[in-house]
């Protein structure tokens, strides 16, 4: 089944690329920010939801990659997609907030699904979700919490977090990871859990990221949470060379490398599918902000493919139920007043975090 799905994805990708070259019309479109749809992470997870719906309904989706990372380039790409017949456009990423704020007004007859962000005026910072747009958010702090908790329960004591750009979703993943490790350390009465913490400033695989991960592994770090699209490839390469471990992000990344012990997942594919299905059933949740979290199965770990030694399904079910029932308070990226939090604002008694620039 996995081989069939991979083959189907490859065929659709080839067809889509050819379609982009010939500018054949397509109702369903996805626009990446600065990554690709085969990044094995955020973009790919989003794209797979679109592909699944399209395949089930004999449609062919298309994807577009902007020429540069800018609001102007994003808006131009939206224009291209609309001119090619797009009726629903998925934009995965916080970086689309400003461009979709404009696009939803420029193209009132087109539906937009903005993942990981809310349309925002770039000048005033005011947010507004129009009736032709749905903003989809995820409780990344819960997914990160589960990964950090599981790692410590499984026996890891020296952890690392390498995030991409310090956008809200990545920050929430990281803060949740730290708090999950803290929760597990407190439960086990440990005082020797450490976490190295760093943002690379990008979401792509680079020699610099691989070198950083390799140096951490050499210094004794046992597992690194690689949080940021393609940068995970660099961390996995370093882990393979060092005989160390990785925690993936966004989607199940166990097929990417034997070093991946689990992945902090959010329901990218499912949420895209749900929104597209709602559109074609005249039930598009326009004007809304939808949050996918533990209580609606919007985040989790892929226990059936995870490579844990001590952390069991029963352990997972117990901690997941606590999250789903709102029994554990987890700090996100901002406080109650909406002010951005630093990692030093997270109360820690059992875990030591070393943040590097």
Image: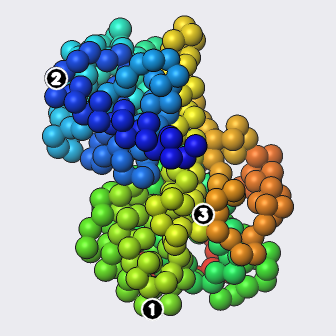
Q: Is residue 293 left or right of residue 137?
A: right
Residue 314 in view of the camera: yes
Residue 22 disc label:
2
- Expressed as whole percent of the image width and height from the top left, the position of residue 128 reads 42, 24
Q: Disc 1 and disc 2: Cα gap in Å? A: 51 Å
**What residue is shown with label 3?**
262
Comparing labels 3 and 1, the label whose residue is closer to the camera: 3
Around disc 2, counting alpha carbons within 10 Å, would you say few (fewer than 14), some (14 to 19), or many (20 or more)?
few
Around disc 1, counting alpha carbons within 10 Å, would you say few (fewer than 14), some (14 to 19), or many (20 or more)?
few
Q: Earlier in the sequence, mark 2 or mark 3?
A: 2
Q: Residue at x 46, y 44 (%)?
A: 6
The residue nearer to you, when weighing 41 against 71, is 41
Q: Earlier in the sequence, mark 3 or mark 1?
A: 1
Q: Is residue 7 left or right of residue 143?
A: left
Residue 217 vs 40, above or below: the answer is below
Label 2 SS: helix
Indicate the colouring scheme. Answer: rainbow
Q: Residue at x 22, y 30 (%)?
A: 18
Label 1 SS: loop
Q: Disc 2 and disc 3: Cα gap in Å? A: 40 Å
Residue 284 vs 180, above or below: the answer is above
Comparing labels 1 and 2, the label whose residue is closer to the camera: 2
- Expressed as whole percent of the image width and height from the top left, the position of residue 121 reads 32, 30
Work out which quarter of the rendered image holds the C terminus and state it: bottom left
Q: Residue at x 18, y 35 (%)?
A: 73
Q: Earlier in the sequence, mark 1 or mark 2?
A: 2
**What residue is shown with label 1?**
219
- Expressed as whole percent of the image width and height from the top left, the position of residue 280 reads 51, 12
Residue 122 in view of the camera: no
């Amino acid at each position: 089944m996995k081989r069939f799905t991979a083959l189907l994805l490859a065929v659709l990708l080839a067809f889509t690329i050819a379609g982009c070259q010939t500018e054949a019309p397509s109702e369903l479109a996805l626009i990446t920010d600065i990554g690709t749809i085969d990044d094995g992470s955020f973009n790919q997870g989003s794209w797979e939801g679109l592909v699944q719906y399209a395949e089930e309904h004999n449609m062919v989706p298309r994807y577009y990659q902007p020429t540069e990372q800018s609001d102007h380039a994003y808006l131009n790409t939206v224009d291209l997609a609309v001119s090619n017949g797009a009726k629903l456009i998925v934009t995965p990423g916080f970086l689309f907030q400003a461009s979709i704020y404009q696009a939803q007004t420029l193209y009132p007859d087109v539906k937009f699904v903005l993942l990981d962000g809310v349309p925002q005026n770039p000048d005033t910072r005011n947010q507004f979700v129009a009736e032709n747009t749905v903003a989809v958010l995820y409780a990344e702090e819960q997914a990160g919490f589960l990964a950090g908790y599981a790692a410590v329960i499984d026996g890891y004591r020296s952890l690392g977090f390498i995030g991409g750009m310090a956008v809200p979703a990545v920050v929430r993943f990281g803060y949740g990871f730290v708090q999950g490790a803290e929760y597990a350390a407190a439960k086990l009465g440990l005082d020797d859990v450490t976490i190295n913490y760093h943002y690379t400033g990008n979401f792509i695989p680079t020699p610099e990221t691989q070198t950083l991960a390799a140096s951490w592994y050499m210094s004794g770090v046992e597992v690194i949470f690689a949080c940021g699209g393609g940068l995970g490839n660099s961390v996995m390469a370093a882990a393979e060379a060092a005989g160390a471990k990785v925690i993936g992000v966004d989607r199940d990344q166990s097929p990417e490398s034997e070093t991946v012990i689990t992945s902090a997942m959010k329901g990218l594919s499912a949420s895209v599918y749900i929104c597209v299905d709602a559109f074609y059933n005249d039930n598009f949740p326009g004007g809304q902000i939808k949050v996918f979290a533990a209580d609606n199965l919007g985040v989790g770990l892929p226990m059936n493919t995870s490579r844990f030694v001590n952390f069991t399904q029963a352990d997972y079910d117990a901690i997941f139920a606590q999250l789903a029932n709102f029994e554990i308070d987890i700090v996100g990226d901002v406080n109650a007043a909406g002010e951005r939090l630093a990692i030093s604002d997270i109360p820690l008694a059992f875990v030591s975090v070393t943040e590097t620039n």
